């Protein structure tokens, strides 16, 4: 399995790899994706009591013991921390989670990681109906709704599953994609439609008996108790039927006792977990499923591939498998309906064979392994190529609210112009023609564009937030040469090598991947075109006490940045009043006495108004993502992005830097 940078790393997370449908699905995806394009690491916990573990073949696995389906707060926190660390170390491009608990912990870990990977979750069913009481169900529904907002794509294994989740308001239909299960069906397709006499003899099935298979975990939601009642009723009505129960669970002793009470113990064989399911189905006449809730049951797909019809409850995605004239459906909990359907199949062997043939034809391609792998590879490719990947939606929204709160309208023109000169001191205005075309990435309120637009032909003002673009449009309404577009750094609507200049001031250090953002900017420049960049400095040359003070404020930022906007606005305003204003005014006072104050914290604000202090306090403490760079790192990143003749401003603000797009022939230097 390749580990080079050309392959897309996928971290796949599932709570446990028991002998169930989700585990079959996950094993196939982990082993079957194109190894030239994808590298997969599977993370799983341990199976529960009474469960048998899936046999692993050709899978790269990381065992995470605290991960499991049960709700255990301490163990769940341990699993979350371990997943965050693993994502940081493995750095996957995609985190794809399966089943409820793994979906909650895996997606949370991915959303806490920087850079944030693509987040995909597959619902193989759900636990929002029929599993818990009303209060717990409401809590879990709310958790799913919150996680769905930040997931890049949600997958349902059936239309019924997706419809149910949309009805529960987990997410809008547009967020979902239906990707039916895919399985290795060849062992089942190889079986003859007629039951195998030798296999039936091994299970003690008489020549005139109809053998049903009931396959799955013996858990309450599977309603094996209903299965026993329906079988007992059908037998009482004269149907010569037996059942092979393939699976196990903690309620098996109760079920065995219940079979004895109903008088059908001699017709129900509890076989436990088996790895030779094709041999069991070879002996069977039909499959039986009585669940109250399902995703897309693997047992029915495999039975259909074996040309065995089904009697099943019409829940979840069952109707996607048991289609017209390929079996019989009954309502959930309908003992009489199930018994009647069992009796009808037992009375008509020819009808069973005809239904089985239709069932096989239906599932052969629809649920094949090849189709599943093609669907998932297509989805991964679409997500990886989709615009807007190199941004954090929460950070973008924060900046949109910031520029709505601080649109710069009250700031005196002289103050804005002074700040503009500080940032654009390196910019080679003399090299630009009057009709030059350029871009302002992350234009925000338009405070830079206000002074750039009068000097150029056309200025493209780009921002990832529509609210920020609206503010910029109002502020620059007297600049007819400005073009406003909502766009992220990796989806700029500008042709390659088309711009005469560009700048990104205070933007790229808030991206998940600043270097990738810089490369995207440079790719839009003509050879020789200048690009101005401002990135937060890494406190180069500052004394230890200064760096310690910054670390303390950065801890505060991590907490403040996650507050609601109103709370954040109030708290950062207080920081401006209690820290920015007194320190700035103190440095101004000391400067008037002849002292050098450039090394004092916040001395750059000594001539700024309180509005600017409040704005920058919100900018500094209200932003979730922040990267810092040394001067050497800024230079190296600019050169690696294709810029040459890099010049870094030696005074504040740190670091402003200017570079020129290398000619195409020199791009590889």
Image (cartoon, rainbow, N blue to C red):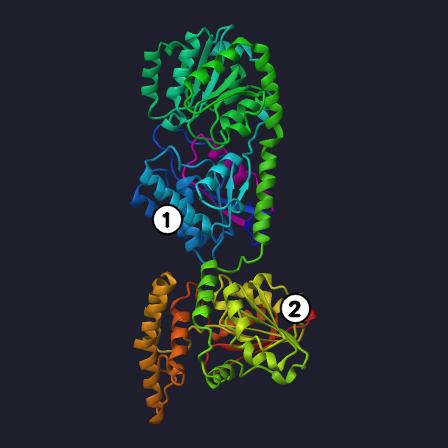
At mark 1, the secondary structure is: helix
Please tell me whether residue 33 belongs to the stretch shown in magenta.
yes
Q: Quadrant of residue 64?
A: top left
For label 2, the residue is 667
**368 versus 352 height, above or below:** below
Image spot of residue 579 (x, y percent): 31, 77
Check if mark 1's residue and mark 2's residue have beta carbons within 8 Å: no
The N terminus - image quarter? top right
Q: Residues within 10 Å of mark 1 (few under 14, many from 20)?
A: many
Q: Residues within 10 Å of mark 2 (few under 14, many from 20)?
A: some
Q: Please tell me which residue lies in front, 585 or 87.
A: 585
- Judged left or right of residue 589, residue 320 is right
- Judged left or right of residue 495, residue 31 is left
Q: Quadrant of residue 590?
A: bottom left
At mark 2, the secondary structure is: loop
Whether residue 192 is visible to the viewer of this picture, yes or no, is no
Tag nearer the camera, 1 or 2 = 1
Residue at point 31%, 72% (across, down): 574
Q: Earlier in the sequence, mark 1 or mark 2?
A: 1
Image spot of residue 127 (x, y percent): 40, 36
**279 versus 97 height, above or below:** above
Cα separation, mark 1 vs mark 2, equals 43 Å
Residue range highlighted in magenta:
9-36
Please tell me whether residue 346 belongs to the stretch shown in magenta.
no
For label 1, the residue is 80
Image spot of residue 359 (x, y percent): 59, 23
Whether residue 227 is visible to the viewer of this picture, yes or no, is yes
């Amino acid at each position: 399995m390749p580990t080079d940078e050309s392959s897309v790393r996928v971290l796949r997370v599932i709570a446990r790899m028991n002998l169930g449908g989700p585990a079959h699905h996950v094993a196939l995806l982990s082993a079957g994706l194109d190894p030239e394009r994808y590298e997969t690491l599977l993370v799983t916990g341990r199976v529960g009591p009474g469960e048998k573990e899936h046999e692993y073949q050709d899978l790269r696995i990381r065992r995470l013991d605290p991960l499991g389906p049960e709700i255990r707060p301490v163990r769940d926190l341990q699993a979350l921390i371990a997943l965050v660390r693993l994502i940081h170390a493995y750095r996957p491009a995609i985190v794809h989670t399966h089943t409820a608990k793994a979906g909650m912990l895996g997606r949370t870990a991915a959303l806490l990681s920087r850079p944030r990977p693509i987040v995909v979750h597959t619902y193989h069913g759900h636990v929002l109906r029929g599993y818990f009481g009303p209060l717990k169900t409401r809590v879990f529904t709310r958790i799913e709704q919150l996680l769905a907002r930040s997931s890049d794509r949600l997958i349902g294994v059936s239309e019924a599953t997706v419809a149910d989740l949309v009805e529960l308001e987990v997410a809008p239909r547009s967020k979902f994609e239906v990707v039916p299960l895919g399985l290795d069906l060849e062992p089942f397709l190889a079986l003859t439609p007629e039951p195998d006499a030798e296999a039936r003899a091994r299970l003690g099935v008489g020549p005139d008996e109809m053998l049903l298979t009931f396959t799955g975990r013996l858990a309450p939601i599977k309603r094996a108790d209903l299965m026993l009642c329906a079988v007992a009723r059908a037998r009482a009505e004269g149907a010569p039927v037996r059942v092979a129960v393939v699976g196990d669970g903690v309620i098996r002793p109760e079920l065995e006792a219940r079979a004895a009470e109903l008088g059908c113990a001699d017709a129900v064989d509890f076989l436990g977990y088996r790895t030779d399911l094709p041999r069991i189905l070879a002996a069977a006449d039909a499959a039986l499923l009585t669940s109250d809730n399902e995703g897309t049951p693997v047992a029915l797909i495999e039975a259909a591939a074996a040309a065995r019809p089904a009697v099943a409850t019409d829940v979840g995605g069952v109707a996607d498998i048991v289609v017209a004239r390929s079996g019989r459906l009954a309502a959930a909990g309908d003992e009489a309906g199930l018994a009647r359907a069992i009796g009808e199949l037992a009375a008509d062997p020819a009808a069973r064979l005809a239904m089985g043939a239709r069932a096989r034809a239906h599932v052969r391609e629809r649920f094949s392994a090849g189709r599943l792998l093609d669907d998932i590879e297509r989805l991964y490719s679409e997500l990886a190529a989709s615009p807007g990947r190199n941004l954090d939606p929460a950070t973008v929204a924060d900046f949109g609210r910031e520029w709505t709160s601080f649109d710069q309208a009250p700031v005196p023109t002289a103050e804005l112009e002074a700040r503009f000169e500080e940032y654009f001191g390196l910019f080679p205005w003399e090299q630009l023609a009057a009709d030059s075309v350029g871009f302002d990435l992350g234009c925000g309120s338009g405070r830079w564009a206000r002074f750039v637009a009068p000097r150029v032909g056309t200025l493209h003002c780009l921002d990832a937030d529509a609210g920020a673009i609206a503010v910029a449009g109002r502020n620059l309404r007297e600049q007819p040469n400005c073009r406003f577009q909502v766009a992220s750094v990796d989806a700029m609507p500008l042709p390659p090598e088309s711009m005469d200049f560009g700048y990104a001031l205070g933007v790229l250090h808030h991206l998940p991947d600043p270097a990738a953002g810089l490369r995207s900017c440079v790719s839009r420049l003509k050879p020789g075109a200048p690009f101005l960049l401002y990135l937060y400095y890494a406190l180069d040359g500052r004394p230890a006490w200064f760096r310690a003070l910054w670390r303390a404020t950065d801890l505060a930022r991590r907490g403040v940045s996650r507050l609601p906007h109103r709370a954040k606005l109030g708290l950062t305003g207080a920081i401006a009043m209690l820290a920015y204003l007194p320190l700035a005014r103190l440095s101004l006072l000391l400067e008037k006495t002849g002292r050098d104050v450039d090394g004092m914290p916040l001395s750059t604000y000594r001539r700024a108004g309180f509005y600017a202090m409040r704005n920058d306090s919100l900018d500094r403490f209200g932003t979730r993502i922040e990267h810092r760079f040394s001067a050497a790192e800024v230079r190296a990143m600019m050169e690696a992005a294709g810029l040459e003749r890099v010049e870094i401003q030696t005074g504040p603000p740190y670091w402003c830097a200017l570079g020129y797009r290398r000619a195409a022939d020199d791009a590889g230097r």
